[in-house]
Amino acid sequence: MTTPSHKALVPFVSVDNMMRLVHSIGLETMLKDLADYVEADFKRWELFDKTPRVASHSDVGVIELMPTSDGEAYGFKYVNGHPKNTSEGLQTVTAFGLLADVYTGYPVLLTEMTMLTALRTAATSAMVAKHLAPKGADTMAMIGNGAQSEFQTLAMKAICGLKSVRLFDKDPAATAKCARNLAAAGLEVVQCGTPEEAIEGAQILTTCTADKQNATILTDNMVGAGVHINAIGGDCPGKTELAAGILHRSDVFVEFPPQTRIEGEIQQMPEDFPVTELWQVITGQKQGRRDNKQITLFDSVGFAIEDFSALRYIRDHIKGTDFFLDLDMLADPDDPRDLFGMLQRSKG
């Protein structure tokens, strides 16, 4: 058997190693770091290839690919969304991602992204709230206490100085789970019996529910002046969380309008409904929060550039660690024209 003089191995970060990496860095530190990576890529938004995610819908869920490139690296995420999975003891969302070198086309990282997506989604929410939430906001209503809720809360604490979170879920067991997980977080955690109770005194309202349907988690009369709404649960066609009247009273900020108009809260609105792209706020080209009576609404659906930022972060932070395995994924013969010879020689 001939051993090639070089072998292209691809670092792979498993779920176990991702969790080890998080604990090694520290969860709140990693959330802040990820927010910085996402913000840096929003500042160079115009460099990226951009397309709405490629979605395959079924009666029970959706499977999507989310690709982008900045010209030097290419990244994609595979992700599903299956709300019915929870009742079967499965995750609603699972994901993995890949980063590649544009010059060679070779992958340079393969990683789980179920855990990483939760981290990057929370980091993005808090980064956006830093720009849009009212000054001094320190109380959040967390409506929907599923898999995202703790990450969202801790990102707001780490990046925006959150001091209190008010929890509501239609399933009291989910609220109890979230409260238990946040018990040592250094926050005031209040379990609420209704969404109306949860939003009392909150300057940030986060909605994150899983049903694949148009729902009204917040009605128009529940939302007063001056709040920031972080709407992260509407992420596919036919799934929304907010009454249309709230959108009419809000300044709406989005990641990539062609995708958000398909999947976000604004799918309820006419095609010409005005929105502001977040990258323009972050670069100073457009105004974010104007005054303390304005309602700002982040209509978040998640976008490929945020995943690209997270993949960059993992690539940079596994160097010099043992938080990955090298995978033999690439057939890379000594003579690139002799792939068949490589196969023959492998018989030994």
Image: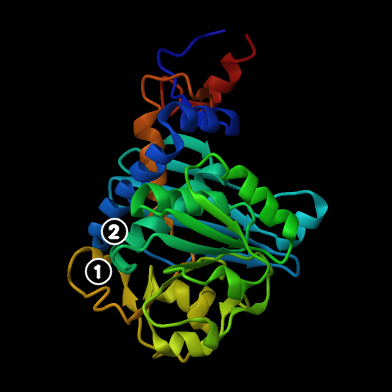
- Asked whether disc 1 touches disc 2, contact meaning CB atoms under 8 Å apart, the reply is no
Label 1: few (<14), some (14–19) or many (≥20) C-alpha neighbours in 10 Å: some
Identify residue for label 1. Answer: 281
Q: Quadrant of the C terminus?
A: top right
Report the mark closest to the observer, 1 or 2: 1
The reply, left or right, for residue 65 in relation to residue 278 is right
Please state the horizontal and vertical placement of residue 284, each as a whole percent of the image: 17, 68
For the residue pair 251 and 94, the one nearer the viewer reads as 251
Horizontally, is 45 left or right of 261 in the view? left
Could you say which disc has been placed on residue 42 in the image? 2
Q: Nearer the viewer, residue 270 or 348?
A: 270
Badge 2 amino acid: Phe
Badge 2 marks a residue whose secondary structure is helix
Closer to the camera in the image, 175 or 235: 175
For residue 72, which quarter of the picture? top left
Q: Is residue 49 left or right of residue 145?
A: left
Residue drawn at point x = 70 percent, y = 64 percent: 61
Q: Quadrant of the image for the N terminus?
A: top right
Q: Amino acid at mark 1?
A: Val
Residue at x 21% of width, y 75% of height: 286
Residue 44: tell me if it is visible.
Answer: no
Side (left or right) of 153 relative to 347: left
The correct choice, above or below, for 74 with respect to 253 in the image is above
- Report x, y in % for residue 90: 75, 49
Q: Position of residue 315 (x, y in %)?
A: 38, 34
Task: Please say which color scheme the image uses.
Answer: rainbow
Q: Quadrant of residue 191?
A: bottom right
Work out which residue is located at the far left of the displayed protein and give it: 284
For mark 1, give the secondary structure: helix
Q: Nearer the viewer, residue 113 or 151?
A: 151
- Residue at the spot 24% in from the left edge and 63% down from the top edge: 282
275 in relation to 32, above or below = below
